[in-house]
């Protein structure tokens, strides 16, 4: 059984499991429809990337999933902004995508479904793109909405970048995504921006 078939046959179970994991954390209650707009969308986009890769996909084709499906990052960005409005922290935004991945791997193990190397790379890359998109959008939206109330614009920008860098570094430490992907790139950009801002402050 391919991962695409596995996702199709177990879609509702995966959504339910993710909902349980999210609810088990200390987080604001989800409003009706918000979880459905996040997890099912990601599962659909992951399936689309797997279909394009095909059963004979290679590591290179899996790594190209971001270029073929930029909607993953775009949808995740919208999700990040929505969760900010609901009161979710940046860590809780990351946890939601981690919960989806965990639900997939746990259920696959229970059903004795084996992921091929290309499928694993595609899952990893799609997750990486989603996390990077959500984290970046969450940070930028919070900075945009809070900045008029901040007395020091430089302090506000640095605070956002430090939080973003810390979160992405913790994701990379967990080993769920590769450092050479979108999340690693987000960390690098945050560090570069921090250095530039500190240079201006001197």
Image (cartoon, grey):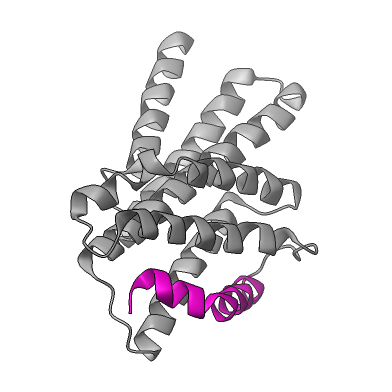
Up-down relation of residue 182 to residue 24 (above or below): above
**Residue at the image point whose x is 51% and y is 80% from the top:** 10
- 191 is higher (above) or lower (below) than 41: above
Is 2 on the left or on the right of 161, as rendered? left
Nearer to me, 155 or 157: 157
Magenta stretch containing residue 16, yes or no?
yes
Q: Is residue 170 visible?
A: no
Residue 186 lies, in percent from the top left, at 40, 37
Left-right relation of 118 to 103: left
Q: Is residue 59 visible?
A: yes
* Residue 144 in which image quadrant: top right
Q: x, y (%) of residue 97? A: 51, 60
User: What's drawn in magenta, residue-wise?
Assistant: 1-25
Instruction: Name the image quarter holding the N terminus.
Output: bottom left
Q: Residue at x 38, y 76 (%)?
A: 105
Residue placed furthest toward the right: 32
Q: Is residue 23 magenta?
A: yes
Residue at image coords 51%, 43%: 71
Instruction: Identify which residue, 132 or 14, lies in the foreground.
Output: 14
SS majority, magenta: helix
Q: Identify the residue at image location x=75%, y=22%.
A: 148
Between 56 and 189, the one nearer to me in the picture:
56
Q: How many marks?
A: 0
The picture places residue 110, in percent across and down from the top left corner, at: 39, 90
* Left or right: 147 as drawn, with respect to 135: right
Location of residue 79 with respect to 32 vertically, above or below:
above
Which corner quadrant holds the C terminus?
top left
Q: Position of residue 162 (x, y in %)?
A: 47, 36
């Amino acid at each position: 059984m391919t991962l695409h078939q596995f996702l199709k046959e177990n879609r509702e179970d995966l959504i339910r499991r993710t909902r349980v994991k999210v609810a088990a954390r200390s987080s604001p209650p989800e409003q009706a429809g918000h979880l459905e707009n996040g997890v099912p969308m990601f599962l659909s986009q992951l399936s689309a990337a797997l279909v394009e890769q095909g059963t004979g996909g290679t590591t290179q084709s899996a790594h190209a999933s971001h270029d073929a499906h930029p909607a993953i990052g775009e949808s995740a960005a919208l999700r990040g902004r929505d969760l900010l409005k609901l009161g979710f922290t940046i860590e809780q935004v990351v946890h939601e995508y981690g919960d989806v991945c965990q639900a997939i791997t746990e259920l696959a193990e229970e059903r004795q479904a084996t992921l091929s190397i290309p499928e694993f790379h595609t899952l990893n890359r799609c997750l990486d793109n989603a996390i990077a998109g959500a984290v970046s959008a969450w940070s930028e939206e919070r900075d945009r909405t809070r900045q008029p109330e901040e007395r020091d614009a430089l302090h506000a920008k640095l605070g956002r970048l430090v939080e973003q860098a810390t979160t992405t570094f913790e994701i990379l430490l967990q080993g769920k995504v590769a450092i050479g992907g979108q999340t690693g790139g987000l960390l690098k950009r945050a560090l570069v921006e921090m250095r530039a801002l500190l240079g201006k402050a001197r």
